[in-house]
Amino acid sequence: MTELDHRVKGVDHAAFPTFDPAGTVHFYRDVLGFPVVHSICAVGWGPEDHPDFIHFFFDIGNDDRIAFFYYFGFEPVHSRERGDAYAGFGPEIPEFFVRSRHLAIHVENTDDLLEYRHRLDSSAWPVEMQIKHETIESIYTHDPNGYLIEITMPLRPVTPQEDLDANLTIDALLDVVAEPDPTIGKLLARKAELIVDRAAAWELARAGQAAGR
Amino acid sequence: MTTLYVLDIPENTPLAKVAAEDSGVTVGRIGPYFEITASGAIMIDRRATGCRHAVWYSAIGGVARGSRITQHDKDALRVEPA
């Protein structure tokens, strides 16, 4: 495990290109109610062939932001039906892969999740799925650029043992991907060994910390 | 010996409880994990656990070498000696 101190403070911004600034502003500002908090009008920026552009930001809570680039005179980079403004995918690419990259925005409770569900369902971008996962519940839609957006709430607080479990999973993963032909079966066998090696000591250390408080 | 590890979190406790109903199965603990062992097969009925699918398919913490999963679908989880 890392001994490095952890100094970062969340997402400053995540940036995406758009060819539909009107739809993008309508979706994020007018439908979801995310305020516009910053924009840059960039003229003659960068190398000679770099188009002029607008870089604009919406507040997604917690002072974190989602940002877009609109490049004047720059045409869409693909014409495939599947994918988004950034990348297109042919029929040979499975759907699970296309849907793997997404942005999940956090809300605190069911009221807030359902409020955003209501806003989306009243718009041209209704909720496509509402799913109760292991410990979170989420709604999904695609924004006007084809980006998959998730809004998610915790079903309960994360427990300390889930952090241990995550670390054992990742250590087991690194071990099995260092060998040929990694499989989930090999990972679960390696993880069983790590559980035997570390889980009891972890609980003892935690009990010791609690007693020392 | 068949050994299956399941993390002790609220969603997984019904799974350990259902496993323990089989007299041939022992549910112990190692740290925050249930250590579910049997000399033969461990069989857990999903509907008896009431686990929804997302929980059911992510509940396995580890499977000891010498054991293997022979069924893990919407009906049941079965772990047997390899």
Image (cartoon, rainbow, N blue to C red):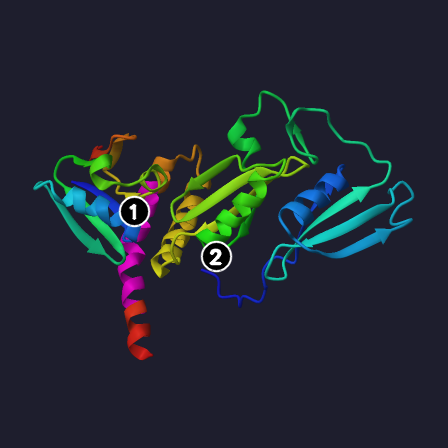
In this view of the protein, which residue sits in the foreground, A38 or A93? A38
Regarding residue B25, the answer to whether it shows in the image is yes
Quadrant showing the C terminus of chain A: bottom left
What residue did someone put label 2 on? Answer: A108
What residue did someone put label 1 on? Answer: A192
Host chain of mark 1: A
Disc 2 versus disc 1: distance between alpha carbons? 34 Å
In the image, taking residue A24 as reference, residue A8 lies left or right, namely left
Residue extending furthest toward the front: A122
Which of the 4 image quadrants contains residue A98?
top right
Question: Do tags 2 and 1 sit on the same chain?
Answer: yes
Tell me if residue A14 comes above or below residue A124 in the rendering.
below
Q: Amino acid at mark 1?
A: Ala
Which of the 4 image quadrants contains residue A92?
top right
Q: Residue at x 76, y 31 (%)?
A: A77
Quadrant showing the N terminus of chain A: bottom left
Tell me if residue A208 comes above or below residue A14 in the rendering.
below
Q: Amino acid at mark 2?
A: Glu
Please tell me which of labels 2 and 1 falls first in the chain: 2
Report the magenta residues as a range: A188-205
In the image, taking residue B1 as reference, residue A180 lies left or right, namely right
